[in-house]
Image: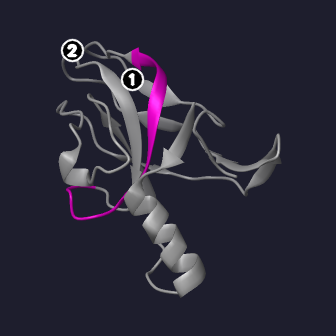
Amino acid sequence: MSGELADEGADFALNILFRHTGTTPGTVYLGLATATILDTDGLADITEEDDGNYVRQAITFGAPADVGGVQKVKNSVAVAFAAWDSDGSEITDCFITDVETGTGGKLMSRLVLDVAKTPKTGETLTYPIDALVFGMD
C-alpha cells in the first residue's frame, strides 16, 4: 500500500530541507485509524484504534530507491501489532507520526489500506517488509 505526506509532514520536510529548521525525529511510529485521514488533519483529528492492547509501533525504512521514476522508501522491518484483547473496529487507514502516544506530535503521512481490516479477539496485525511504501516525485 502506498502512502503520501500529510500537510504537516510536507511542511516538516520542506522546512528541514530548504529552511534548515526543525529537528528530525529519532523514531517514527505507525498508528492505525478507524476512519479516513485527510491531508489537512492533525493527530487530534484522527479516530485512532482503541483496543486495550493497541500501541503505535516504531517503524524503520530502507534507503530511498527509484521505482518507476519515483523515489520511494519502504519499511525494512516487519511492523507487528499485539493480539487484540477484544473484537476490533474496522481499520481503514494508517498513519506515521513522530510521537509514540498522544496528539502532541506531527501527522507526517497517511496511508489508506488496500483492504480494510477488522481484527478479532486474539488476532495480530502485521505489515511485512516492503508493505508500507511512500514516494515523492
Q: Would residue 26 be seen by someone viewing this image from the given angle?
A: no
Snapshot colouring:
one colour
Q: Is residue 11 left or right of residue 36?
A: right
Label 1 crowd (10 A; few <14 / some 14-19 / many >=20): few
Dot 1 falls on a residue whose secondary structure is loop
Number of numbered discs overlaid on the protein picture: 2
At a point 21% along the width and 14% down the height, the residue shown is: 87
Dot 2 falls on a residue whose secondary structure is loop
117, above or below 75, in the image: above
> x and y percent of residue 96 in the render?
42, 50
At a point 36% along the width and 25% down the height, the residue shown is: 92
67, above or below 14, in the image: above
Quadrant (top left, top right, bottom left, bottom right) of the N terminus: top right
Q: Would residue 28 be seen by someone viewing this image from the given angle?
A: yes
Is residue 117 part of the magenta span, yes or no? Answer: no
Numbered label attached to residue 87: 2
Residue 64 is drawn in which quadrant? bottom right
At a point 26% along the width and 28% down the height, the residue shown is: 34
Pointer 1 residue: 124
> x and y percent of residue 26 in the render?
47, 70
- Magenta residue span: 101-116
At a point 32% along the width and 51% down the height, the residue shown is: 40
77, above or below 102, in the image: above
60, above or below 14, in the image: above
Classified by dominant secondary structure, the portion drawn in magenta counts as strand
> x and y percent of residue 113 in the render?
46, 26
Three-letter amino acid code at the position of disc 1:
Thr
